[in-house]
Amino acid sequence: MDRQADLQPISFKSDRLPGLPIMDTIWSTTEKKVAKRAFDEALVRECAALIERAKVLAEKAEQPDDIWALNDYLTEQRDLIYQKYDDHYSQLIFVFAQLLYQKWIGEQDIEGLSEEKLQAIRFMAGGLQ
């Protein structure tokens, strides 16, 4: 599955969140475990897809410029991944909204988070374009 379009930066089109002070959210021990597992699994999935895409591009390479283009592509993707996967608790709801929107996680991956957090994640994922 080619998720190239999913690796591009996205923007959030609404500034209204459903009653949750996102930046000050407290995470229970259980929620921290759920979040870590979902975060780590999404990163593994996205990197696996990137590896497959890089293999395809490498196989198609015929000219020296193709190798440098692959290098540029991988550098860009690394930067996007580093930017997206911010594991600070103050950012995780935003991260999970983006991952849900891009289908790197499903709602089942974040089951165990509070209903407020799930609502905020769903709300933001619905507002991404």
Image (spheres, grey):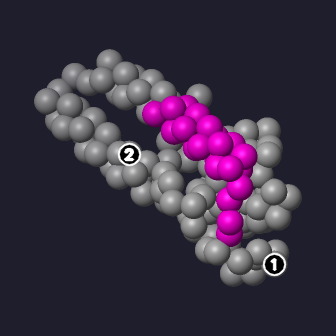
As helix, strand or loop, the secondary structure at mark 2 comes to: helix
Q: Name the side, left or right, on which 106 lies relative to 84.
A: right
Please, what is the three-letter code of the amino acid marked with disc 2?
A: Gln
Please, what is the three-letter code of the amino acid marked with disc 1?
A: Gly
Give the vertical position of 90 relative to 50 (above or below).
below
- Kindly identify the residue that appears in the image at 42 percent across and 57 percent down: 83
Q: Quadrant of the C terminus?
A: bottom right
- Kindly identify the residue that appears in the image at 14 percent across and 30 percent down: 64
Of helix, strand and loop, which mostly describes the magenta segment?
Answer: helix
Residue 43 magenta-highlighted: yes
- What residue does disc 1 label? 19
Q: Name the side, left or right, on which 112 lies relative to 57.
A: right
Q: Which residues are magenta?
A: 25-47
As helix, strand or loop, the secondary structure at mark 1 comes to: loop
Q: Which mark is residue 77?
A: 2
- Kindly identify the residue that appears in the image at 24 percent across and 38 percent down: 71
Q: Measure how far apart labels 2 and 1 are at the Cα level.
A: 34 Å
Q: Quadrant of the N terminus?
A: top right
